[in-house]
Structure formats: structure tokens, C-alpha cells
Image: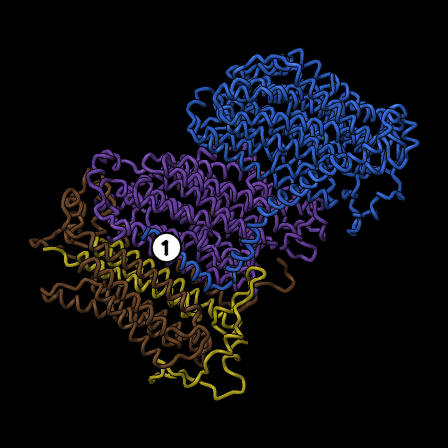
Chain colours: A blue, B purple, C yellow, D brown
Amino acid sequence: MGFFVDNIWLVPACPLVGGLFAGFVARRVKIDPFAPVAIGVGLAFLLSLAAYAAADPEKTVVVSRWIEAGSFVVPLEFRVDGLSTLMLSMVTFISFLVVVFAGGYMAGDPGYPRFFAEIGLFVFSMTGLVLSNNYVLTYAFWEGVGVCSYLLIGFWYAKPAAAAAAVKAFLVNRLGDIGFALAIFWLWTVVPNHDLSYQNVLADSTLQSLPEAARWGIPLLLFWAATAKSAQLPLYVWLPDAMEGPTPVSALIHAATMVTAGVYLIARSTPLIALSPEVQLLIATIGCLTALLAALIALTQNDLKRVMAYSTVSQLGYMFMALGSGVGSLARLAIVAGMFHLFTHAFFKALLFLASGSVMHSMGDVIDMRRFRGLRRRMPYTCWTFALGALALAGIFPTAGFWSKDEVLVALGAAPHASREIGFGMGWLYGPLYWLAMLTAFLTAFYTFRAFFMTFWGPEKLPGPDDPEAPPAPVAAHDHGHDHEDHAADAHGHGHHEIGLESPAIMTYPMIVLAAGALLVGLLFGPTGLFEGHLEHTLGFESLPAAGHAFTWTTPIVSTIVALAGIALAFVMYAEPSDLPARVAAAVRPLYRASLNKFHVDEIYDGTVMALLRGFTLGSRIFDVKVIGGLVQGVANVPWAAAKDVLAKYQNGLIQFYAAASALSVAVLLWLLLFT
Amino acid sequence: MTPEQAYQTVQQTLYVLAPEILLVAVAIVMMTASPFVKVARKHWCALAAAALAAAVMVLSATRHVDPDVYAASAINDAFSFYVRLFVLLSGFIMLGLAHREPPEGRAAEFFGSFLMLEAGTMLTASSNDLILLFVGLELVSIPTYLWLYLSRRSAATREATTKYFFLSIFASALTLYGMTFLYGAAGTTNLKALGALTASSIPYFPNMSLGILAVVFVMGGLCFRIAAVPLHFYAPDVYQASPLPVTAMLSWVPKVVGSAAMIRVLTAVLASRQMGDPLVHKVVILCWIIAVATMTLGNMVGLLQTDLKRLLAYSSIAHAGYIMVGITAAFAGGEKGIAFYHGVEAVLFYLVAYAFMTLGAFGLIQALQTRDGRPATSIYDLSGAGWSNRIPAFGLTICLLSLLGFPPMAGFLGKFQIFSAAFAAVEGPEAFSLQLLAVIGMLNAAVGAFYYLRIIVLMYLGEPAEPLTAVGGWPVALATATCAVMSILVTIASEPISRACHEAAVASNARPAAAIELPPPGTATAAVAPPAIRVARD
Amino acid sequence: MTDPFSIDLLTNYLLVGAALFALGMLGFVSRRNLIVMFLSAEMMLQGVGLSLVAFGRFHGNWTGQVFTIVILTVAACEASIAMALIVVLYNRKESLDVTLWQEVREEGVGPTDLVDEATQAAPLEHEDGIETYPTLTPAGLEPAHPIQPWTERRR
Amino acid sequence: MTDDATFTLATLGVLSGAIGTYLLLPHRRGRAKARTLYVAGGLFAALGLLGFLLLLTPPALSPLGELVSGAFFYVFAAGALGCGVMTVTSRNPVYSALWFAGTVIATAGLFLLADAQFLAAGTVIVYAGAIVVTFLFVIMLAQMEGKAVYDRAARTPGRAVFTSFLLLWSLAYCLVGLSGSYRPDAAGPEAAAEDRLHPGRELGPHFFQEATGAGVRVVLDKALRPTSSLFAEDRGDSDAAILKPNVAGLGEALYADHLVTVELAGSLLFAALIAAVLIADPRPTRKRGETA
């Protein structure tokens, strides 16, 4: 065991080697590029399990002395503690399953080796990010996962939407990286010995000696970085667009692993962040608003993957809500709640994405929910695994989501009291946040099951060319007169097999495994205390206050009722297409009879609640597109416009003008220095 | 000092400058022989390479010669040794890039003037005397005019030469005027002595305005060399109009000359004073303004460009801004010298990283030609090159990522050091402005990322343009491969380079022996305040 | 007895040097003739040299003069290159106007409008001004010509 | 003169000089200017010159030698600046070149007054003799037809005048303050420091003899060698410093202290020669068909 821990660098190295092999060698030696990556990631998972068992808050492994430049020393050092091994196991496990799934999903795509090479690279960066014991190293891998994400979103680069989404993701992430870089510089100036390793920065003595401004400034900057990577308000705009990438990528990077890097960073830095309750409240508020907004938007989406994307944004908001509620004595509980939700979310969200991908695969790349229906017979595995994932997302007992969402809500509910204990005046704001979180739980259940019912329930319908919802004409991306084999069509180019079949075993098995996880991990880790017990082995954890929280029945009961209400409403509204009442009645006759007055209720609902909701949704949409998008666009446009209309004008090519401008600048500078 | 000592000093100076003298001598022989003998271009090139190699050997052989720093006009400290060594090594890369550039009949003059400008660069780094330093600067400029004009005679190169020549003599006049005041303030042109005098308790910048005049004009003139605002104007036009190997040289050699001169003439002379000193305070303001203006202008106008050379010219301007950030930090260093070392060290490290990334980028663009034998000029020429010319495009991607400052490339570590030097330069209320500078720098780096990224995106995600062919033969391949590999290696194996930079930074500020006997600062300095700080007359 | 070269005298020299420097700069940025521009640059160097010599005399060492000699050398180098360059430029455009050399510039920025300036220029002959007193008129003045001489010179 | 008066005088002088020069400069678009404008310009320029000269410290009235050299200083300074203005403002490049020769000769006179006889001769020979004459040839060759439109039009004269006179004003402001700052009327510890810089005592090898700390003295002894001093070591009986013979002293300084510099400046000339020859070479550089 000790051997594996001491050579923990093997965890990032295996996927890297696998990826490089897949990218450069595999084709030449006639090996399926899928194999080396799957083996590498699988090995990494096994090694992670070994590390998981040996987690120790003080254990670090120095691999090499990476940068030594004067007083700027950054060793390549890995930390094997509770938090990192937890993330490591989760990341490698999900990655392994997704790689296996992708082996079936991506078969036949011209970019097949490239895909696996990039996945290998991603797993390398992500495991490095999780393991690194140094803010600078974390930053380096942070940029690395950003690049992998960029490459994978733009995987089908011939498709303009994919290329645009990739650029958008990269730019927004760069915006966040500035915050991270600033935080690092600031830390560098204030910590003793300019040592940016976690054990030094997060040590009690360092934290005590921080200047006043740094106590809230650095946490704020770190959170800024996290909002971009973890898609929070106002920088979440890139994530829904990122669904232009292949579905396994969405499942792996934009649902389960990479987007949680921000959450991980905040959790890792909790001792630092706990210095400033104001920032914690801000984190919780931003998280809550993001969760609500994204849930509202998800209500009206017809693209199955986009529903899931907004759902991811919403759930990430949940995690930040949890982390933000760690005021005073709640710090430890909050981290456990946040990380637990991260952990369970990885399972069920990856599952939901893979299931969506399976649907998409089977429907011939159609993902609009209005164009198919009632697939539960044709795709039983997909249907029932999706159902399990949906239940977990909605938070129904005893699935994983129930336990973690419950913990988040408990932490949030206890926050006002904890704030009063430490005399934090604005702590009462956590009260409204708690109820907004409840509302979000209701909406989550509703939109999740809306998607489920629209896809799998009701009469069977497959997408056809005569479908009224079909796009007017197929968009061809082949018009750039060349036939290079590396240039994919706009859809991923696996052969056009018959529509409406269940996916092959290589795709369904990972879904089944994940479904088992979505059902069981909550039960296994939550009430048994295994999860909390493991996180105990995390650096800086022992110094955090641990309040024994009394178990109350209120929160779980209320949240379950709310979730069930959401599911019920979704069922009433979407289980049957209104234009085919007879077949719906045949399918769900008892329920249909029980609600004879449904038509009436529907109308009332449509007139009042739905209108209100639509208004909300529309407002959120407008806010999303106009305000946030406009803001991002505007920020990007200012330098461009300034350069074009002001600065470029001076480059008129005239020697004398150049000399005159230089002379004038020198004269003015001289004058300024002399007389000010 | 007795005549014997003077003789000995001159002798040692000659030893110190032996590599430069060797290069100049070979250059003169080449240029003189050129009309009389008929030798192929590649042989002239080989001769130049051999001269460079010999100079490296001479340089290492004279490593131990150490003339008296207060008497000799050239010194052999770590700064001069490492900078000269690196300039010589980068000379091989430039030679590799330019080996086919001159027409057959002009090769001797072309490579001869290359040797001269190498010698001028080295002279600037090793000189310890204002006059010699100025000669070094001119020994770079004059061959540069020739380079700009010699290899190709078109309306564009003619215009580029005119622009560069006229603005260069203008900048020279500015530099000289500043040097005049530097000399006038203390009565000696020996830079180490100047440094010692400013450090001493004697108020040798008796009137602060003399110091301001000196710094403003010298800085103004040197801004031309490194292409910083307000004398940056020439860069885009001249880069765009010149052949690529010349542009590559222009983006690197003047930068190292200007930075070395700034360190030798300004930072090392004034760094003995603290940030609290009014002169240093004003100089920091000056550099701050220049740095911010340069970075912002370079990056913002860079966003508009579609011409590759013009884009890289603005990139070069932006990088001059980052160098100025380091220089600002060096100025703010103060008596303790800690931040001075950080600043100078960061600048030197950045120059190393910059050499590889910029020479690599220019070299790879030069290597990619369209089918009709025209080098790629617009960024759209590179569209889709990532798949049609995998290896060159991959190298170019590495260099561009390094220019962008992407970890773990060399540019990332360079920027990181520069910004952290600015962050840590001073404490107290003035720290804020320097930290703000670093923040502005980082914002700029984020904006600037866009235009490098645009090229990468085009190369990998763009519609393929007409296929490009890689040209240049093994010298170009070797040179560019070295650049690309080093762009990564500099970070991974940063230890020797950063140690050299550190030694050089310490050496550049060292004022040995005599200065040690100075009375401790604080006793005499406080009593004998500069009598004539009369900025405003009230 | 003190040295006659006092600080006051030094200041006088420096002021004259500064004025020459500034005048040279004025000429460099405002005159369009390449040769006059170059001469103006040399005038800046004259100002520099004057200041250097004065400083050297004030401090009592030769360094100022040595520096000036080096500057003189560099000025001679620059002059030789300038001459060659100007002759080449003249052969190309038949004009010494620096404005003509602005082909390479930022995209979308227009050139300085030469035609407009030419039409507004004053006629060549009989101009009133300080230069109307008897001077050596340059030889070879063409008689009146249907093409205006100044547009002709813009070939 | 009081500070305020100096300030006002400097400002007025620079201002009227600027107005005068602006009026004298060619019109922006080459239009003819009225004769009165030129007259006014000349007047203003002369006024500015006068004001500028008043800014200079007048020489002592006795002994006679100083008075005479002081008077010559004024003559040469006025000559240099007047010729300088004319160089810049002349519409005819031939006149510009000739006026420039005048500036050079006046500057050479100033060099003479500063005991730089060799340089005075050298400047006249190099500039007036070589550079100006060759440029005159070029101008004559290039402009046989007379004044071209670009000579009668200045590029942005207003901005140029503003720039250079702002610079001149700042410079004058600094430099006038330079002399004032050394006046020995200050008291206290500063006086001691100032004494070292007091006229007449800071010269020669004993320049820094009062320097505090032995370290500085060591530095200075090395940096300022006897060869580099203008003065003979032996002062004889008189208190006054005796200048070394000019050419011998300069030669000694050049070839003892600055040997390497001189040699490298020589190679600079060689490089410039090659550059000039190659730039002017009319032969095509490339054989036909050869590509980059």
C-alpha cells in the first residue's frame, strides 16, 4: 500500500501515457486507441483506491523540484489526504466508465484516436489538479483542464456552433483564471517564505498573520476563479453551450468532474475562506441564485442535453450553497455536505448524461424531446437507468441525491443560528436562501421528470423527416470543397444505423453500474458516516469546528414532499400528449380516472402558475442572453473597439507623425515628472 | 592611478572584449574580402557560425579576467558573461533562420553585419562606460540598417529602412542627451563609479531635475530599442515590410540590447536609492506609465491584426510592456536590493523565454510557404495548417502558447516571475501602485491571449486554406525545433537558467571593494540630504 | 583664484545646448524634406555635444570631449548612410518628401492627402516672405509650364 | 535675478520664441504667408532670442579677459540659435543647409570658449566641411527645379512648435534651477556638501577630495585618472588650475583611457561605409527567378 502512495504520480501518469499512446502510436501498431486509455484510466482508478485507503492529512509526495527561480520555488508535490483521494477515486471511476461508454458511442468517428488522446490528457490534468499540493501547481493543471475542455468541446470543429462554444468556454474560463492568478500573487506576497503549498498557506499561524484586506480579498478572488470553472453566476454562460461536444465529454467533463474543480478549490481552501463570513454568505447567495435561475431556465428547454446542462449549473449552485453556509461552527458540516453532494451528483449526473447520449445515439443524433416519445419499450435499459438517475436528481428516498441534498439543506437551515453564535449580523439571510433552495428542489424534480416523461413515456414516436418539429433542411457542413478524412461532418460520423434500437452492451453496462451507484452510494456513505469519516483525513480539517448537529425530521420530510409534488405535477402535465388522449388513457388509466377534472386544472394551471412561470423563465432567459451575454460580449468588445477607433488611427505610417508623437510624449512625460 | 595600472586596465579590457573584437575582426575580413573572392553563400554562413563558436570559446576562456570595475570600460561580471553567452547562442538560431536570406552576391556583407550586430549586443551587455555602451548601441543599429535593406530591394523594404533609420537617429539623439546629464551629474562615465557615487552619502544627483532629465531621455531612447511606447510606432510597419528572418532578428536583438542597456545605465545606477527617494519615486512613475501604455496598446491593437508579422509586432510591443514591468520593479528595489534582484532577474529570465518563443514563432512562420513560394503572411494562410503540416504547426502552437503565457510553457514562468517581482517590490502605501501594475499586466495577458489563440484556432479548427509546404532545410528545422523544445524545457529545467539570471542580477548591482567602506546609510545620508531638491519653485 | 568656468557658465552652455536640441527636434518633426530632417537631427546632436563639452570642462576631465568625438564619428556614419539612402529614395520617387513613404501602415487608415495639399500650395514664383531678398537663385528654373511644377514633382 | 523674475522671463522668452518660430515656419498646406507675418515672426523670434539670452548669467565685468570671452559667448550663442531657427524655418533646403553650417560654426566658437580647440576644428571640418557640403550636392542634384511643394509646407507646425517649446521650457526651467541650487547661501549641513560643488573647487584631480568616506575616494581615484583630467597635475605657484595642452591631453585621454572605444568607433565607420556603398549600389540584388 505504501508503495502505491509513494508513487502516487502513477495516477496522473497512467492516463497520460495511455492518451499519448492512443494519439500517436495506436494507429501505427493497429491497436484500438480505446484500449490504452481504458487500461490507463482503469489502472489509475485501482491506484486511487489504494490511495483512498491510505489517506493521511499530512502525507505529501514530492515528485520533482519543478520550478526553482530565486525565491520562487514550486515543487511538483502531491498531497494524499482525504479530500484529494476522494476526488481522485471519484474522477477516475467516472472517467473509466465514461471511457468504456465512449468506446461504443464514438465508434466510427473519424476523430476516434484524437478523442481518446484528449480524454487521456484530460484525466491526467484533472487528477493532477486534485492531487497537487500547491496553489501554483493547481493553477497549472487548472489551465490544463481548461485546454482539454476547450479541445473536447470543439471536437467536431467543422461545426460552427461547436467551434464558437469552444472559444466561448475558453474565454470565459480565462476570465476566471485571472482571479486565480491574482489570488496566487496576493498569497505569494503575504504568506511566510513565499511558500504556496497548502500546508503552509492553510496553517493556523499563516492565517492569523494575514493582513486585513487579504482575509476577504483572497477568498473573493478564489471564488471568482471558481465561478468560471464551476459555471456560476455570472460566468455560467459557457456551460450550456459546451453541450456541443460529444455526449461522453458532457458527461465526464461538464457534469461530473471538471466543473467541480471550483467546488473542490473552495472546499480545499475552506480554512482560508472561513476567515470571512461575508464572503461565505456571498458564495451561498450566488450559489442559490444560480441554482434557482438555472432551474427556471431548464423548465422550458426542449433539448434533452440542455436540460441536463442547466441542471448541472443548478446542482453546482447547490454545492456552493452548501460550502457558503459553513459559517462558524458549521464549517465542517458544510464541507461534508458540499463534497457529498458533489460526490453523489457525479454518479447520477454522469448517468443522466450517458442515458441522454444513449437516446441521442439511438435516435440518430436527434436530441429534441418533441421529436420522440415513449421509448421505454424500445430502450428498456436506458429508460430505467435514466429513471433511477432522475429519482436521484429529484432527491427521492433512498437514492443518493436524497441524502446529499438533505445534508445541504440541513447545513443551510442551521446557518442562521450558527451566524448568530459568531455574531455575524447578516446571517439571517440564510433563512430566505433555505426556502429558495426548497423551491429549487421542487423545480428540479419537475423538470427532471418532465424530461423523463417526454422521452420515455406516452405513445411511441420516432423522429422522422415529416415531423413538424424537424429542422427545415438538413444543414450540410460539407461544402468546403475538400475531402480530408479528419474533417468530420456536423453530426458525429458513426454509420447511420437503424433508428430506435437499444444501445450496445458496451454502452449500457456503464449506465447500469452508474445507476447502481446512483441508488446506493448515498445510502452507503451518508447515514453510515463513512463519508464524513474519510474527509476527517483532510489537511486543516481538524482545526475546523465540528458542531454535532441534531437530526431533525423536518427538512427531509419537507424536501421529499416537495420533490414528490414536482414529480406528480410533471406526470400530470407531460405523461400524455394532449392530442392523443385515448392512448394516454390506456397507458395510465387509473391515474387518468382519478383526475377527471384534469382538463380544468390544466387550464387553471396554464392560466396562472404556468404563466407566472413562463414569465419568470422568459425573464431569466432575457437576463441570460441580454444582460449576462451582453456583458460578456461588451467586455470583450471594449478593447477591440478602443483599438480600432482610437489606437490604430495613430499607426498612419508617416515617419514624421511617429517622431512628433514620440517627441510630444517625451515632452509631456518630462513636464509631468518635473511639475507634479 | 599610475600609468602602469592604466596600461594593465586597458590590457584586461581588451581580454574581456576579446569575443567582440574577434567577431568584429571576422566581420571586417568578410566584408573586405567579399568583392575579391567568390565564395558560396553557405560557406559565408558557415564562416559566421564558426566565428560565433570561436567567440563562445574565447568567452569561456576569458571568464576569469576581472579588471578593476571602477577603471575599466568593460567588465566581465556574471551579467556580462551570461548575457553575452546567451546572445551568442541565440545567434546560432538566427543564423539558422537567415541562412538562405541574402542573395548570393551579398552574403559576405549580410553575415558580416550579423556578426557586427552580435558584437554590438555583447558590447552593450559588457560595457561599463557610457561611451562604450553608446558605441555598442550604434554597432547594433548600423548593421541593422544594412540587414533591413540588403536582402531584398522592394518599395516595402526601402520604406522600412527609411522609417527605421530616421526614427533610430532620433532615438539615438534622445539617448545621448540623457547620457549627457548622467555624465554631467557626477562627472564620470564609468557606470559602476556612477552607481557608487549615487549610493554614497554625497548628493551626487545634486539637483534632482538633472536625474529626471537623464532618466527621461535615456529611457525614451531605449524605448525605441525595445519597442515600447512612446517610441513603438516603427515596429508594426517595419516588421510588416521586412523579410521574416530580419523581422525575427528585429524582435529579439534590439530587445535584449535595450533591456541590457536599461539595466546597466539606469536601474543599476539608481537602484541604490530607495523608493522613498524622490528621484526614484518619479522614475518609478515614469516606468509605470510606460509599462501600462505599452502593454495595453500592444495587446489591444494586436486584437485587430490579420497580418502575421504585424500581429507579432504588436505582440512584441506587448512583451516590451511586460519587460517594463520588470524594470519598474527593479527601480523600486531600493537599498535592500531584494526587489531589484527580483526585477532584474525576472527581466533576464523573461528575455530568455522570449528569445525562444519569438524566434521560434517567426522561424516557423518563415518555414511555412504557400505553394507559389510566398511565405505565409496573413493569419488565414495558416488556416487548417494544423492538419496539413502537423509538425511545424505543432511547434508554432507551442511557441504561441508560450507567448500567450500558458503553463507550463516558458512564457508562463517568465510572466509569473515578472508579475511576482512587481507584486513583491515594495511595502507600504506605494506597494499598491506596483501591485496594480501587475494586475493590469495580467488583464493584458488575458486580452492578449485572444490573438494568439486566434491563430491556434485557425490552424486546428479553420477551413483549410491552400496547403503549405515546409521549407528551409535542416538549419531552419533545427533552429525552430530548438526554440519549440526550449520553450517547454525552460520551465521544466528552469534551475540552471534561473540560477544564471540570479547571479547576473546580483552582479549587475554589485559595487565591490571601495564601496564597502562607505559609512552606513542612515547616519550620513540623513544629515547630508540632497541640498537641491527644488522641483517646484514656490 | 577659482577656475573661470563657473557653474553659471555651465548653465549658460547647457541652456544653449537645450535650445539647439529643441530646435533640432522642431525641424525633425515639422520639415518634410528628408535632408532637412536629417540636418535637424544633426542639430540635436550639436546640442548634445555642446552640453557634453561644457560638462566636461566643468568637471575638469576629457571625457566630455571624448564622448563628443565619438558622437561626431557616429554622426558621420549616419550621414553617409543617410546620403546613400536619400539618393536611392530620390531615384525611386523623384522627390525628397518624407510623406511619400507611408505605404505600410495600419489597415483602414488613410494616407495623408497629398493632392489636397498640392492644390492649396502657393505658386512658386513671386512669393512674399523673408526669402525674397536677393539670394542665389537655384539654377535651372523652368519657364512657365502647363503642368504645375509642384504636381509634376509628385510623379 | 530672483526666481520669479527668471521664471517669468523664461516663460515669456520661450513663448515669444514659439510664436515667432510658428510664424516663420512654412504654412501647413504650403500657402504663402503675408510678408507682415514673416516680419512679425522675425520680431517675435528675435524677442524670444533676446529673452533667452537674458536668461543666461552675464559674465563678470572684470577682468577684461572674462568680459571679452563673455561677450563672445553671447555672440556665438545668439549666432547658433539664430542660425538654428533659420535652418528649421527656411523654405529652401539649400539655405537650410547653409544656415546649418552657420550653426555649426557658431557652436565651434562655443567649443573654443570652453577650451575644446580640437573639437572646434573637428566639428567645423566634419560638419560644415563634409556633411553639409555633400548634402548640398545632393540637394542641388535632387532639386534642380527649385523649391518643391513639400519644402513650402510644414508638417503640423503648430503641434511641432508646441512640442519642442514645451520641451525647451521644461529644460530651461530645470537648467536655470541648476545654477541657483549651488549658490552658497544655504546654511547648515547642506553647506558642507555644497561647498564641494562650489565653483572652482570641484575641479581637477582634487574634485572629490572632501568626499565623505574613504570608499568614495577610492572609487573616484580609479574612475578619474590623471590622464582623464583637463588639468596638469602640477599647479605651480598659482592657485589657478593649469590646463593641459589641448591636443596632447585629448590624445592621451583617447588612447589611454578610451582605446577600445576608439577602435570600435573605427569599426563602426567601416560598417557605415559598407552600408552606404551597398545601399547606394544600383545593381539588382538577386538573380532572376531566385526566390526568397
Question: Can residue D234 be seen from the camera position used here?
Answer: yes
Secondary-structure class at tag 1: helix
Q: Which residue position holds label 1?
A: B175
Badge 1: residue crowd in 10 Å (few <14, some 14–19, many ≥20): many
Is residue A580 placed above or below D193 in the rendered structure? above
Residue B502 in the image: state x and y as whole percent.
42, 35
Number of numbered discs present? 1
Position of residue D13 measured from the top left corner of the image (x, y, whole percent): 27, 66
Q: Residue A81 location in percent, x, y?
A: 58, 17
Look at 31% across and 66% down and name the residue there.
Answer: D15
Asked if D3 appears above or below A593 in the picture, the reply is below
Image location of residue A284, percent across then percent down: 58, 28
Q: Nearer the viewer, residue B56 or B154?
A: B154
**Looking at the rendering, in which quadrant would you find the N terminus of chain A?**
top right
Residue A113 falls left or right of residue A69: right
Using the image, name the chain to which the residue with label 1 belongs. B
Q: Quadrant of residue C17?
A: bottom left
Residue shown at the point (28%, 51%) measured from the top left: B209
For the point 63% across and 21% down, the residue is A408
| Whether residue D58 is situated above or below residue A537 in the rendered picture | below
Residue A318, by quadrant, is: top right
What amino acid is found at the position of numbered circle 1 in the picture? Thr
